[in-house]
Image (tube, rainbow, N blue to C red):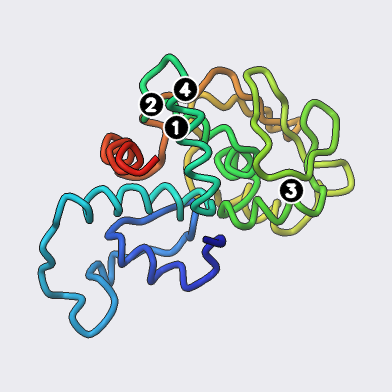
């Protein structure tokens, strides 16, 4: 399944949660599901509960189903809790790190900046959004990209406060991964165990 490019607010309403990585908009004014019968109660089967939690991860981080399955398989091979490791791996993606550091308003915007070669990791240009940032890595915009309007606007009005595991140097415009993010690092309500249960039955 390809990456989602449809209406972002509509997807957040369908999932019943605001996903800051997907959009800066809020569902507060229309919290019910989209469609003619959106305000009716829907029976929450076990499958639906697990699917919704999985979809939150997929759409917030802008992944294809194959990418999320691959990340889950890697997390399951680790010696730590599968769900916590999965969140850690997703938070360490370069496009997400740029978003969480405040360089971009959303993850799709961050992905575009990375694809166009606007960012350096440890002084070297990286144009792969899925690049896995390691502890101690320093992320910064290229010298020629420091006046990019999207970047300047995002720094002026960040979507989220920076997490404590990102050290930010405002003078140098550098962000460093100071330590690994925890299993609760996702910036939205998430029952990650349901994601583990969803894939355990299908992989």
Q: Mark 2 and mark 1 in contact (Cβ < 8 Å)?
A: yes
Distance Cα–Cα, label 4 vs label 1: 11 Å
The answer to whether the residues at label 2 and label 4 have Cβ atoms under 8 Å apart is no
The numbered disc on residue 147 is none
Quarter occupied by the C terminus: top left
Compute the Cα span from label 4 to label 3: 28 Å
Which of the pair 29/56 is nearer the observer? 56
The answer for how far apart the CA atoms under marks 1 and 3 are is: 22 Å
Q: Is residue 3 above or below residue 173?
A: below
Q: Which mark is residue 77?
A: 4
Farthest residue, direction top: 79
**CA separation, marks 2 and 4?**
8 Å
Q: Earlier in the sequence, mark 4 or mark 3?
A: 4
Q: Nearer the viewer, residue 159 or 70?
A: 70
Toward the bottom, the furthest residue is 36
Percent across and percent down for residue 174 are 72, 31
Residue 69: % across, % down: 47, 43
Q: Residues within 10 Å of mark 1 (few under 14, many from 20)?
A: many
Q: Mark 4 against mark 1, which lies toward the viewer? A: 4
Helix, strand or loop at label 4? It is helix
| Discs 2/4, front | 4
Question: Label 2: which residue?
Answer: 82
Left or right, residue 91 beside residue 76: right
At mark 3, the secondary structure is helix
- The residue tagged 3 is 114
x, y (%) of residue 24?
Answer: 47, 59
The residue labelled by disc 1 is: 86
Q: Horizontal and vertical percent for residue 31?
A: 25, 67
Q: Is residue 198 visible?
A: yes
How far, Cα to Cα, is label 3 from label 2? 28 Å
């Amino acid at each position: 399944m390809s990456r989602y490019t449809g209406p972002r607010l509509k997807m957040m309403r369908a999932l019943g949660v605001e996903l800051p990585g997907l959009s800066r908009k809020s569902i507060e004014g229309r919290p019910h599901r989209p469609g003619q019968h959106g305000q009716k109660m829907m029976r929450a089967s076990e499958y639906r509960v697990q699917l919704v939690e999985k979809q939150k991860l997929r759409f917030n981080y802008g992944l294809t189903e194959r990418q999320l399955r691959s990340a889950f398989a890697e997390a399951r091979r680790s010696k730590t809790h599968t769900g916590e490791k999965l969140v850690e791996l997703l938070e360490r993606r370069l496009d997400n790190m740029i978003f969480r550091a405040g360089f971009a308003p959303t993850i799709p915007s961050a992905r575009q900046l990375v694809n166009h070669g606007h960012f350096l990791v440890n002084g070297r240009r990286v144009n792969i959004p899925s690049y896995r940032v390691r502890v101690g890595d320093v992320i910064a915009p290229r010298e020629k990209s420091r006046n990019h309007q999207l970047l300047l606007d995002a720094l002026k009005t960040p979507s989220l406060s920076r997490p404590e595991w990102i050290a930010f140097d405002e003078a140098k415009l550098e962000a460093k991964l100071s330590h690994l993010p925890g299993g609760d690092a996702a910036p939205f309500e998430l029952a990650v165990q349901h994601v583990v249960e969803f894939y355990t039955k299908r992989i």
